[in-house]
Amino acid sequence: MKKVLIFILCAAVAVCAFSACSKENSAHQHTTDIIETEEAVIKEADAINLVQSYSDEELGLTSEQRAKCSFMVAGNGVKIKKDNYIEVIATVKNAHKDGENTTYTFDNQGVYYIRFDGKKIMRKDMTSEDEVKYIDMKIKAVPTTTEHTHTDEETTGDKGE
C-alpha cells in the first residue's frame, strides 16, 4: 500500500511541476489579436501603390534591393501604440533547391505601416537590433487602383432635402 501511495504522490508532484513550467512559458509567449482591416481607408493594392510611390531613399532601400523586391500586404492589421495599421512588406523570395525539392524563404528588406485613417505612414528601422523603432514618413496622396463611384448626392449637391 505504501508503494502505491508513494507512486501516486510522485505522479502528482510531476504533474504539478510540468504544469507550472508550461504556465511560465506561456506567459512569455506573445499573443496576437487578429485585427480586421475593413475600417482602413487604404487597402490591398492601394496600400502597395502608396508604398511604391516613395523613393528608394524614403523607403530605406538601395536601388538594387528595391529592384529585387516584391511588395505584399499582410492579411491582418497590426496594432502599434494603440493605433491600427495596414502592414506592407518589401521582400525578396529566395528558392533553395535540394535535389528534386524546392523550398522558399522570404528576406524582408522593408516593412511599412499605414495607419487605418491614412494620415500616418512609417517604416520599421531594419538596422535596429535592440528594440523595434519606427521612422515617420511624409504623407502622400494615395495612388488608387479602384474607381470611386459618385452617388447622386455627390454629383448634384442634392442632399435629399
Image (spheres, rainbow, N blue to C red):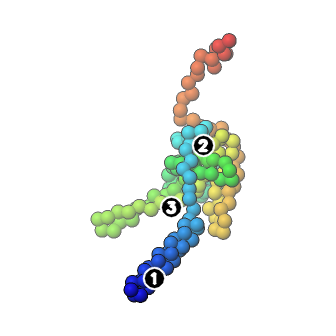
Please state if 77 lies on the left or on the right of 101 as rendered.
right
The x and y percentages for residue 51 are: 60, 46
Q: From the viewer's perspective, is the residue at label 2 or at label 1 nearer? A: 1
Question: Which residue in the structure is indicated by mark 3?
Answer: 107
Q: Which residue is mark 2?
A: 50
The circle on residue 10 is 1
Distance Cα–Cα, label 2 vs label 3: 21 Å
Tell me the CA gap for discs 3 and 1. Answer: 49 Å
Is any atom of residue 63 visible in this view? no
Q: Residue at x 32, y 64 (%)?
A: 101
- Please report whichever mark, 2 or 3, sits nearer to the chain's N-terminal start: 2
Disc 1 residue crowd, few under 14, some 14–19, many 20+, Cα 10 Å: few
Please name the amino acid that badge 2 sits on.
Answer: Leu
Q: Earlier in the sequence, mark 3 or mark 1?
A: 1
Tags 3 and 1 touching, CB below 8 Å: no
Q: Residues within 10 Å of mark 2 (few under 14, many from 20)?
A: some
Q: Is residue 42 above or below residue 149?
A: below
Dots 2, 1 in contact, CB < 8 A: no
- Location of residue 24 with respect to 117 vertically, above or below: below
User: Which quadrant holds the C terminus?
Assistant: top right
Where disc 2 sits, the SS reads helix
Helix, strand, or loop for circle 3? strand
**Label 3: few (<14), some or many (≥20) within 10 Å?**
few
